[in-house]
């Protein structure tokens, strides 16, 4: 049985920070690197956070059926290449997806009856919208327009629906505690897996 962890939450909530902690703590855990048409932030590198590609290349990949799922959000395409998940799983890795709500729902539906892949989904939420805005500003990587666009996408009605879909919800207030909680979730899911064999 392969393990797939799906992590979602609004932009700036701390997903990458928490995923980084998991990657450092669990050597088998690997991030599935998505393709995107957006430009890299100052601290991002092609092939590390994302594969940064042109829109025509993204469209070509859609046509060739290369994505497990893809979406258009904040004015750009984002997609999970099937090859990423396949390569991680082929090497007995634990796969992590950092994807938005609709993509997560798609993937969960795809694998809900799978005997080979066990999905664990985690939703990361901010303590408040104001704090989310402050984190986006403090990160210093997005324009004011992009920050406003990301905040306006954080829709509480939609959130109430998606909260029911995820196995776990972490309110990322105190970073040290959130790191402990996410590691516990990973370890519990991986250990319960061992006993189910
Ligand atoms: P995301 O991947 O969800 O867009 P990041 O991991 O890039 O978010 O985090 C956004 C910013 O918030 C970063 O500058 C990060 O250092 C900071 N951050 C993350 N978690 C916390 C926290 N619990 N308290 C305060 N700042 C945080
Ligand atoms: P950002 O531009 O802040 O890196 O990401 C914007 C949003 O796109 C985040 O919610 C992130 O989780 C989501 N995202 C990143 N890659 C993918 C992907 O491959 N598929 C989907 N559906 N969402 C993605």
Image (spheres, rainbow, N blue to C red):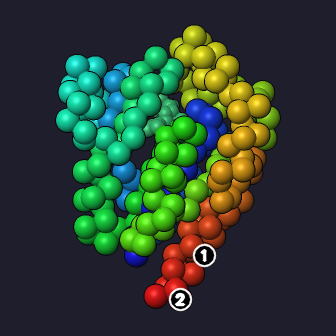
How many numbered circles does the render carry? 2
- Say which residue label 1 marks: 188
* Residue bearing mark 2: 195
Residue 101 lies left or right of residue 118; in this view the side is right
**x 63%, y 70%: residue:** 184
**In this view, 46 is above or below 24:** above
The percent coordinates of residue 64 (x first, y second) are: 20, 35
State whether residue 50 appears in this view: no
Which residue is depicted at the point 44% across and 66% down?
Answer: 114
Q: Which residue is at a point 32% across and 55% down the rendered structure image?
A: 85
Q: How far apart are labels 1 and 2 at the CA level?
A: 11 Å
* Quadrant of the image occupied by residue 129: top right
Q: Is mark 2 within 8 Å of ligand 2?
A: no
Residue 136 drawn at (x, y percent): 62, 27
Horizontally, is 73 left or right of 160 in the view? Answer: left
Q: Nearer the viewer, residue 155 or 91?
A: 155
């Amino acid at each position: 049985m392969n393990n797939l962890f799906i992590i979602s939450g609004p932009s700036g909530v701390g997903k990458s920070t928490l995923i980084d902690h998991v990657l450092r703590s669990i050597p088998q855990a690997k991030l599935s690197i998505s393709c995107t048409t957006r430009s890299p932030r100052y601290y991002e590198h092609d092939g590390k956070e994302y594969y940064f590609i042109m829109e025509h290349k993204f469209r070509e990949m859609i046509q060739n059926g290369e994505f497990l799922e893809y979406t258009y959000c904040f004015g750009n395409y984002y997609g999970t290449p099937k090859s990423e998940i396949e390569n991680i799983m082929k090497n007995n890795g634990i796969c992590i997806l950092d994807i938005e709500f609709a993509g997560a729902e798609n993937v969960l539906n795809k694998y809900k009856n799978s005997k080979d892949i066990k999905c664990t989904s985690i939703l990361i939420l901010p303590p408040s919208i104001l704090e989310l805005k402050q984190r986006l500003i403090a990160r210093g990587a997005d324009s004011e327009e992009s920050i406003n666009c990301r905040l306006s996408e954080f829709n509480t009605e939609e959130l109430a629906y998606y909260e029911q879909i995820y196995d776990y919800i972490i309110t990322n207030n105190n970073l040290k505690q959130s790191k402990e909680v996410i590691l516990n979730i990973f370890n519990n899911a991986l250990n319960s897996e061992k006993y189910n064999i």
